[in-house]
Amino acid sequence: MRSLLLSTVAGACLLAPSLASAQTDADCPPGAWFCEETEPNPDAADTDDVDDAATNEPQVVTETDADGTRKIVIIDKAPPPSKPARRRIKKEWGFNLHLQGVMMGRGHQTQKPAENAGMGGLGFSLRYRPVPHFAFDAGLDFIGGIDYEGNERAETALLLNGIVFFNPKDKVQVYALGGLGFSGAQVNERQRVETTDGDVLETEERKEFSYFGGQLGMGVEFRIGRKTALNLDVIGFVRGRTDEQARTEPEFVDPETGRTTNTSGGGLFRGGITFYW
């Protein structure tokens, strides 16, 4: 799964230059949100004005009739049609704000999320869109709540994504995203310990974890203006622990088989707004 995620991200990055070279004037119809007028070359404008002035001046011609009478004929030349302004692809920067909820699935057949499990948060990202079909996105997410095992958890994640827009000329644009993620978590882990007298004691220990992984997702962006868009997307992620305690203190233990793992996954449902400039 990790190799698939890394291959997808690498492919998206390699795709960006080819998308940029494929853009032509035909991709910039008048009024398109992703195009802008090019600035004319002052030197070229001056030269054209001089040439047009010389070409468009009335021409005086002297003609002689058969009887020897000379007459002067003035030929008025119409100006040539003006050339349409060339348009170029407009590069965009964007700032995205979003809210998100964590989707928790089922682990082992008999293992379910805690009854009070639920996590959510907010995030923001900076986006660079060099061509209409592709964008780079780097952001921070902050998530908190009760995790799968019923423990209080707070996470901070750095997400680096590539975004491919399939229909960038439309107001409703479908996109796919994929990238890498780095995150850290602080967990208040609760444990129930039975004493020799048969009493049950609850203990709480604060632990810190760090992770590295990747994510893939799909979404829709709604252009509500030339500089404003709303977005909805669903992202799935897989990650593994990178902290020093990962080998000696695995995060997950199967209650039936005793197998341990430090690999985890989940999903995010996000909704937000992007401001472009």
Image (tube, rainbow, N blue to C red):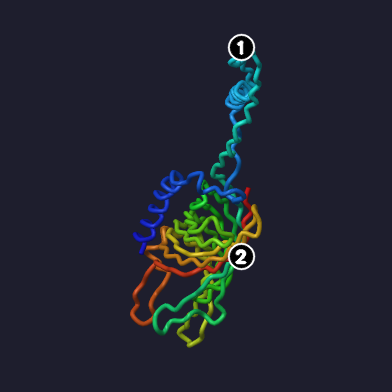
Residue occupying the point 56% across, 42% down: 87
Amino acid identity at mark 1: Gly
Identify the residue under disc 2: 99
Amino acid identity at mark 2: Leu
Identify the residue under disc 1: 68
Viewer can see residue 75: yes
Q: Position of residue 93 (x, y in %)?
A: 58, 48
* Viewer-proximal residue among 154 and 76: 76
Q: How many other residues sit within 10 Å of disc 1, few (<14), some (14-19) or many (≥20)? A: few
Residue occupying the point 39% across, 57% down: 8
Label 2 element class: strand
Viewer can see residue 122: no
Label 1 element class: loop
* Viewer-proximal residue among 3 and 146: 3
Which label lies toward us, 1 or 2?
1
Residue ranking furthest to the front: 67
Count of all numbered marks drawn on residues in the image: 2
Q: Position of residue 69 (x, y in %)?
A: 64, 13
**Rendered position, 66 above or below 160:** above
Q: Position of residue 27 (x, y in %)?
A: 51, 49
Q: How many other residues sit within 10 Å of disc 2, few (<14), some (14-19) or many (≥20)? A: some
Callout 1–callout 2 Cβ contact below 8 Å: no
